[in-house]
Amino acid sequence: MSEQKKVKSKIEDVAAEFLDGDNLKNILDLIGFLKDNELTPRWDYTNRWSFNYKSKKVCYIAISGNEKLWTFSPGHLSRQGAPFKEWFADYNQYITDDELKEFVWSHLRNNTIKCKNNTCEGIKNITILGKEFDRICFCWTIRIPNLNGAELECAKKLILVIKTIIADLAAAGKA
């Protein structure tokens, strides 16, 4: 980590070092999409980059050299100081596309065990996009490894939704 912290490696370079085939092609596709939408990568931690819009996290991408995989995680949409149950309030208002709802639902991280140093017991009884869930992890709510095909396209739609939410909240003075 210390070497990467000094150098602040470019995500494309690390991806090319650890990934190949469709995994490399798909991560480069998503990185290109993010950059085309004015979301530049910022080195965050060893093999992890965040993509921000108006100083708010839109998503993270992490690359695992050991497992030869990459992971996409949308940023939490909580407002400053908002309780965990409100993290998805903006999703509920902005996501109306059924395919995108299914994408979010299918990748929610159900927390049946404690994580993050035994501090996360999950969000209990939360409605996300019209569907009731119990014990959803609030440490990394959505984490998707090796996006491909339809998942990649849904991730792009979700990124644009998050960017729109951030812009609307900023315009309303709520971000």
Image (spheres, grey):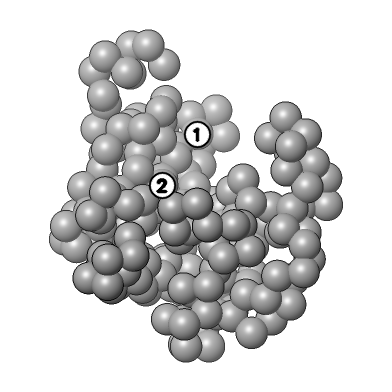
Q: CA distance from mark 2 to mark 1?
A: 13 Å
Q: Where residue 5 sits in the image (x, y, percent)?
A: 32, 18
- Tag 2 secondary structure: strand
Q: Eyeballing the image, is 142 above or below 127? A: above
Q: Residue at x 53, y 73 (%)?
A: 89
Q: Quadrant of residue 156?
A: bottom left
Q: Is residue 144 visible?
A: no
The circle on residue 64 is 1
Residue shown at 77%/69% (left/top)? 125
Q: Residue 61: where, in percent of width, then height?
A: 41, 45
Figure quadrant of residue 10: top left
Q: Quadrant of the N terminus?
A: top left
Q: For mark 1, does the 10 Å Cα neighbourhood hold few (<14), some (14 to 19), or many (20 or more) residues?
A: some
Q: Nearer the viewer, residue 173 or 58?
A: 173
Q: Which mark is residue 60?
A: 2
**Percent x, y of residue 108:** 64, 62
Q: Residue furthest right?
A: 112
- Which residue sits at x=26%, y=49%? 55
Tag 2: Cα neighbours inside 10 Å, few (<14), some, or many (≥20)? Answer: many
Q: Is 132 situated above or below 34?
A: below
Question: Mark 2 or mark 1: which is in front?
Answer: 2
Using the image, tell me which numbered label, if any, was put on residue 121: none
The residue lying toward the viewer, choosing from 40 and 81, is 81
Q: Is residue 175 visible?
A: yes
Q: Residue 50: horizontal and vertical position, in percent?
A: 35, 43
User: What amino acid type is highlighted by mark number 1?
Assistant: Ser
Q: Is residue 98 above or below residue 17?
A: below
Amino acid type at circle 2 is Tyr
Left or right of 113, for residue 150: left
> Tag 1, which secondary structure?
strand
